[in-house]
Image (spheres, rainbow, N blue to C red):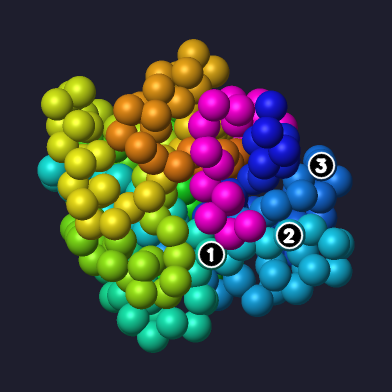
Amino acid sequence: MSSLSLINADLHSHSVISDGTLTPEALAERAYANGVRLWALTDHDEIGGQLRAAQASKALGMDYLAGVEISVSWLGDTIHIVGLGIDPNHPQMLEGLRLIRHGRENRAKLIAEQLLQAGISGAYEGALHFAGNHELISRTHFARFLVEQGICKNTSQVFKNYLVEDKPGYVPHTWASLDNAVAWIKAAGGVAVIAHPGRYPFSDMQMDALYKQFKELGGLGIEVITGSHRPNQYETYGNIAKQYGFLASRGSDFHDQKESFIDLGKLPLLPDHLTPVWSVFQ
């Protein structure tokens, strides 16, 4: 196994700045304690925690890549594109993300109206209570409110009965275009990565179109080993990375110690026949 593949890299995680429950500093400490030696904070549509995350990583002696996870509308659904190694102060990136966040607030008010029609009051204020950043109020914050109210036992149950298509609280939204998301990441000096491709409800033909369009736009990687993939999907997406010539990324998609499927740094290592995305930054 190559030395690069042996690095415990966790390049997908979320802090209280978006929809996680830990501060950037607490996340850095948790990652380092779990053996992570290369880390990226990738909050949703927000880079406000990057300086804190970088400073905490430096204090621990842990290598750091500035990151972001951008919400993208593609074929009528939402996908996510991770940007790694970005300049968090790049004006084109900052303005694009600002516009996405503005859309989140409007969507949240519509979600609350739908939940009120379903007999659940106070949802907007309740979700805000869980949102560390009010510009980034999301479905996850509403889910935590519904659990707190005893309406559901956990957030997994929420997303089976609420906030999804054909259920109370579902509000579709148009996010960034794939073209814009990749362009912002490239302009900011970063590498664009398709997050957890195994989660999307597309056919093989549609996924093929996504991979090809992403690559034509200058996207370089896909997540292979991720907390949002089942273990039996690791090989599938490793093969896809080889087939399309993508760099391979690894990240827990950690949000919270109770809600997340796997902890920071606890995923299997990347297979040594794949080229890690972090090889670009060596």
Residue 99 horizontal/vertical position (percent): 29, 75
For numbered disc 2, what is the local secondary structure?
strand
Q: Tell me if residue 62 comes above or below residue 135 in the rendering.
A: above
Distance from disc 3 to disc 1, alpha carbons, whole Å, reads 21 Å
Residue 273 in the magenta stretch? The answer is yes
Which residue position holds label 3?
Answer: 35
- Name the foreground residue: 34 vs 27: 34
- Give the residue at x 70% y 70%: 54
- Where's residue 168, x and y in %? 27, 39
Q: Residue furthest top?
A: 232
Name the residue that disc number 1 marks: 85
Marks 2 and 3, the one that precedes in the sequence: 3
Q: Nearer the viewer, mark 3 or mark 1?
A: 1
Q: Residue at x 22, y 32 (%)?
A: 207
Which amino acid, by three-letter code, is at mark 2? Asp
The residue segment tinted magenta is 258-282
Task: From the image, tell me which residue sits under label 2.
Answer: 63
